Amino acid sequence: MDLLENLVIPATTQHLALLKVILVLAMLIFLPFFGMLLGGTGFSVIFNAYGRKIKNKLFIRLAKDIIDKLAINRFVGLGLGVIPMLAITFCYAQLMFEVKVISVSLLFVGTLLLAIAINFIYSYQNTFQIESLIETFKDISGLKKHELDTKIPEDIADYEFDLMNTNSNSGLYGFVLLLLSGFFFAGGTTIALYSDRYQDFQNIAQVFLSGATFFNFFFLIVMSIAVSGSAILFFFFSWQGGLHDMDREFSNFVKKIGGNIAFTGAALLPVFLFLSFLVIPDIALSGSVFTYTFLAFVSILFLCNFLYAVIKNSEMKYIGAAFYLVIVSFGFIIMKNQAAFGTASVKHLVAINLKAEELEKEKKSKTINTAGVDGEEIYNRICAACHKFDVKLVGPPYQQTVPKYTGDVKKLASFILNPVKVSPDYPPMPSPGLKPKEADAVAKFIMEKVSGK
Ligand code: HEC
């Protein structure tokens, strides 16, 4: 991604710390929503196809309501999906400045795929709404059921046929693209952990060679199942009092299906969390990785407990708690992943920081304006009476004293303008009475000479 490489500049330690915070926040927004979108689309598409096949209205209605509630709308898809993922990509581009590995490219492709997927998903969502509009229209047309087939104008029938085609196709396309996007996301974040093997991953296609990527992709799917199941329960029964137009039959149906999805996902989470430990490379392991894994584990156990109460004892009051616990568990899992990434990239981050400081200094010495003033001339005229570069005169040799200014021309110039007492071995240096610009020029001259430029 040359484009991204050109956009990022090496960041200093403070900036890197800020980036890590932004990264965690973006992940906290992205992962739960992505999970809801992936699970919501997947289950909706499956229930829709199944419901139409066995002509069961409950499944079709569930499919419609799931995609309505979990995907919310296009703006949310953009705001909680595409934009956070783009932010994540940029953070990785910045944190992996000048590292030659495919992680950032994978994340970028994943973001593009997500943007396309979102288009399909919301047009899938739309078809349900138009379909129910047509149904209402038929209801109020006063035609009897057996008359509908013959009396409905042909273009409406055609339109309905197209609509149903779009419905099944765009839902499926959206789902497949989302899966791909998730795979690329898993690839980008997983490969970034293998900082000792970056040279093995240079071509995007190599993501398919990474076993750890496949594992983390399945982990992502399990997370999606857990969060979308809990979200179904939450948005149908708890959020703003739940859906109001559910009859008893539908409500029991949703409770059973949503509860089963949520519990299956939540029960698989600890297994995957434990196994995910085995695929973290040694170079990324640290105490905080263990701590966050442990915390994630505890919060998932609580989650399972609450879900169990909801399913077995119908204690609907725990639905909210369960949903928030999924998010908290996600938070710990994200912290664990980022702790691992932080450890894996520690060496590289130090290098970025050094580079940033160098750039900063270079910029500083370039911005010092010494035009029209000759530093060398000033040195010969004033300083040379007391200073040489290599031997001691009245004052110390520059080669001894100047290196401690480590390239900071401004700092040296300010000493020259107003000398202060430094060493007990020498008398104090009298103020040479220069103008600031002259001090800059002579400071720059002796600094360049000492560093041999
Ligand atoms: C009259 C003699 C004299 C002149 C002229 C003089 N210096 Fe010095 N300079 C000294 C002495 C003595 C010290 C040691 C001061 C101390 O250690 O407290 C010193 C120290 C320094 C140091 C070391 C500061 C440090 O942090 O250790 C620098 C750099 C320096 N002078 C630069 C200059 C420059 C540039 C000029 C010309 C513009 C200049 N000096 C002119 C006598 C002089």
Image (cartoon, grey):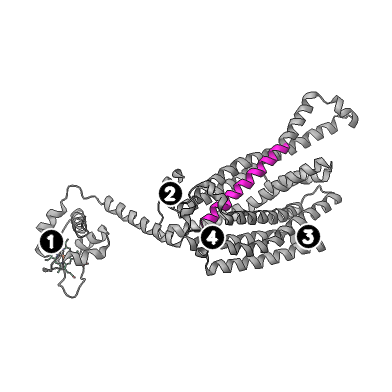
Q: Secondary structure at mark 3?
A: helix
User: Disc 4 vs disc 1: which is toward the camera?
Assistant: 4
Question: Residue at 26% across / 63% down in the picture?
Answer: 405
> What residue type is disc 3 on?
Met
Q: Which quadrant of the render holds ligand 1? A: bottom left
- Give the residue type at disc 4: Gln
Query: Which numbered mark, 2 or 1, is in the foreground of this view?
Result: 2
Name the residue beneath numbered marker 1.
383
Tag count = 4
According to the picture, the residue beneath numbered tag 3 turns out to be: 316
**What whole-number distance in Å separates the C-alpha atoms at marks 1 and 3?**
85 Å
Asked whether mark 1 and ligand 1 are closer than 8 Å, the reply comes as yes
Mark closer to the chain start, 4 or 3: 3
User: Label 2 belongs to which residue?
Assistant: 8
Q: Residues within 10 Å of mark 2 (few under 14, many from 20)?
A: some
The residue range painted magenta reads 167-193
Q: Of label 2 and label 4, which has the lower sequence position? A: 2
Q: Residue at x 42, y 52 (%)?
A: 98
Going by the image, does 360 lie left or right of 394? right
Report whether residue 69 is seen: no
Report crowding for label 1: few under 14, some 14 to 19, many 20 or more residues within 10 A (C-alpha).
some
The image position of residue 155, as x and y in percent, is 77, 24
Kind of residue sitting beneath label 2 = Val
Q: Secondary structure at mark 2?
A: loop
Alpha-carbon span between mark 4 and mark 3: 34 Å
